[in-house]
Image (cartoon, rainbow, N blue to C red):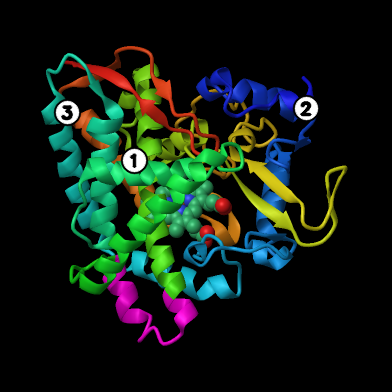
Amino acid sequence: MSLTTYDPLDPSTLTDPYPVLATLRRSTPIFWHEGMRSWALTRYDDCVTVLRDHALFARDPRRTGGTVPQPSLSVQTLDPPEQSQVRSLFMNALHAQDLVAVERRAGRVMAACLDEIAGRVEFDVMTEIAAPLAVAVISDLLGVDQPDVHSFAQTSDAIMRSMDASLDPTTAEPGRIARQQLSAMVETWFAASGRPGVLSHVREHVGPLSDADLGQYVRNTARVMFQGGYSTMVAAVGNAVHTLMRYPQVLDQMRDPAVLRTGVDELVRYDGPVQGTSRIATSTTKIGDVTVRAGATVLLLFAAANHDPAQFPEPERLLLDRRQGRHLGYGWGTHACIGAVPAQMALRVLVNVLLQHPMRLRLAGEPLRRRTATMRVFESLPATSHR
Ligand code: HEM
């Protein structure tokens, strides 16, 4: 395998990225990717080493002389110590939510989706199940009125696609406009929403927003919570339903609550939505036998790390009771996913309602992957239902 043949947007890689990543992990576990101008890491241990060391590996490009547009400064782009206050504000707000009530309401939404599609010859899992469930959970958590699913999905998709602007520059401008639209919605929610939820909790605890920078970071982070939470959940639900349709026997195994708990994590390890993330070396250092110069970008290929046999025995098998080794589907360290607990809850709701409903889902045609590198998500996932 030559180093230059890895193309995350290649149709066969979009369909199944794991074989090419396994070959790379064996032959050149750390390789320079010219298209992405990055050192790509495929081994689990190398990824964790980078994620653990936020002094040496920055998320915030300003630490190595880069710039970040003001609307992009959020929990996701800042590093400690600036990031810490924003991160704990949102973490505390999430911990304060009544997740049992959110779970109950999400269950009702999911059951209504299944009732709606029962008996239809064919439907798209992404528009009929994944999007409505994700919008309902995120709106409920944040404590805002639910936006129109279709138009919100369009805005979110434009932002999601622009995450690959280094590979496809045409996605940058639509992404910037969509970010502005979403920011305007978030401003309105911040000012108006009186419902209990993450936003009102943050508003009460941030104080009078006298620090202009903090105020901006908080608003930008609220946008990231909505957008990031929605887009990863849609992708995760789609990938999970796809896996469950490919291996129908798996669903019944998850009637056991212990298997359900580990199983929803195994589904994310097995075919998770976030394919990777990046950091920038703040000084020249070595990873394995590769010298990474100060200012160089390091791309952590979570999809490869989560299938690394050194960490996950029999990585290509879906083992629902897998306990050994924490996967990187929710990241690790200072930027690990803030919403992992509600995301796990939403996936449990998905599985539970699929189990309780008399109808079963079956693939009804060729699924289509979206042409995105960072997020692994279906553009459409055709299915049919039967009893
Ligand atoms: C199955 C669903 C989800 C998956 C697989 C997922 C995955 C991830 C991953 C891998 C990261 C770390 C990225 C990095 O290190 O660069 C992350 C960060 C983040 N996630 Fe999630 N996520 C999910 C759902 C959610 C939800 C529901 C929310 C909000 C309620 C959320 C909010 C965030 C935020 C705000 C960050 C940035 C944290 C920081 O940089 O400090 N995520 N997520």
Mark 2 is on which residue type? Leu
149 up-or-down from 271: above or below: below
The residue stretch that appears in magenta: 198-215
Is 206 magenta? The answer is yes
Secondary element type, mark 2: helix
Q: Residues within 10 Å of mark 3 (few under 14, many from 20)?
A: few
The reply to whether discs 2 and 3 touch (Cβ–Cβ < 8 Å) is no
Of callouts 1 and 2, the N-terminal one = 2
Q: Horizontal placement of 164 versus 239: left or right? A: right
- Which residue is disc 2 drawn over? 3
**Which quadrant would the C terminus be assigned to in this image?**
top left
- Which residue is disc 3 drawn over? 357
123 up-or-down from 108: above or below: above
Secondary element type, mark 1: helix
Of circles 1 and 2, the one toward us is 2
**Residue 263 in view, yes or no:** yes
Q: Residue at x 17, y 42 (%)?
A: 109
Residue 69: x and y, percent? 54, 63
Name the quadrant containing residue 197. bottom left
Tell me how far mark 2 sits from mark 3, CA to CA.
Answer: 47 Å
Residue 158: x and y, percent? 41, 43
Mark 1 is on which residue type? Leu
Q: Foreground: 326 or 205?
A: 205
Mark 3 is on which residue type? His
Of callouts 2 and 3, the N-terminal one = 2
